[in-house]
Amino acid sequence: MQVRILLFATLKDLAGRNRLALTIPLEHATVANVRQALIAEYPAMKPNVDAAIAAVNEEYAFPQDAVHDGDEVAFFPPVSGGSGEFPEVFRLASEPFSTDEIIAAITIPATGAVCVFSGMVRGETNRDGDAHQTQNLEYEAYEPMALAKMRQVAAEIRDQWPLVQGIAIIQRVGKLTVGQNTILIACSSGHRDQGCFEAARYGIDRLKEIVPVWKKEVRPDGQSWVEGHYLPTPEDRA
């Protein structure tokens, strides 16, 4: 059987490509088999492939999950719900966007409060003894899955804060310079005490757990992918 492999972030750099076809010498294969076959093809990548998260056809997958001929299997490092009566915006943006435009898109006549979290490219970092400068960041995403997981984050927000009205999740991709906006999470509600603050905080924290987006930090002394530590579980599936 043959599967399509997608590689992201560090894995893409190590392989020198982001897509490849992989033949699995089995009639019935699992994610674990695909991982082993990829390591056999690229033995120098073994530590990274062993630690990578897997997804099959744009959903998180685990070692025992079946893989079929023609499936798309993605491997990537840990990452540093949508229709209804209320407006929602999910976007991977390659160009700057207007915060005012996003706020307008998620408000309705009954809206009285909007909470916005906006992330920025930080030029200087001094945290936990790590002091360094950043020239720019480069973001990439596993786009179809990232958009699907943004919708999942919104669905989780609605489960926990049912009075939230509009939700926007916008992630920039590509090269971003110091001071540019990297991400925006916005939640609207009728009143400020109806969950919009808590929902926006949950949105950014959850995005960094399950939405497959990575950043490469370019510094004066070099560059590296910034990888997270959260490993998805079966409960993180939509």
Image (tube, grey):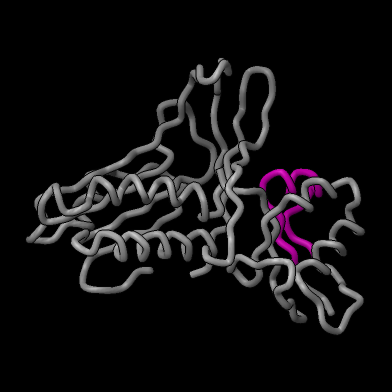
**Residue at (45, 51) in percent of width and height:** 207
Segment tinted magenta in the rendering: 5-20
In the image, is residue 196 above or below residue 238?
above
**Residue at (61, 36) in percent of width and height:** 226
Q: Is residue 104 visible?
A: yes
- Position of residue 96 measured from the top left corner of the image (x, y, whole percent): 38, 42
Residue sticking out furthest to the bottom? 27
Q: Does residue 207 appear left or right of residue 200 in this picture?
A: right
- Position of residue 105 measured from the top left corner of the image (x, y, whole percent): 22, 57
- Position of residue 61 measured from the top left corner of the image (x, y, whole percent): 65, 67
Residue 62 colored magenta?
no
Which of these two is toward me, 188 or 129?
129
Q: Does residue 62 appear left or right of residue 123 in this picture?
A: right
Which of these two is toward me, 184 or 80?
80
Quadrant of the image containing the N terminus: bottom right
Residue 18 colored magenta?
yes
**Residue at (63, 72) in percent of width and height:** 57
In the image, is residue 38 above or below residue 64?
above
Classify residue 184 by image quadrant.
top left
Q: Does residue 44 appear left or right of residue 144 in this picture?
A: right
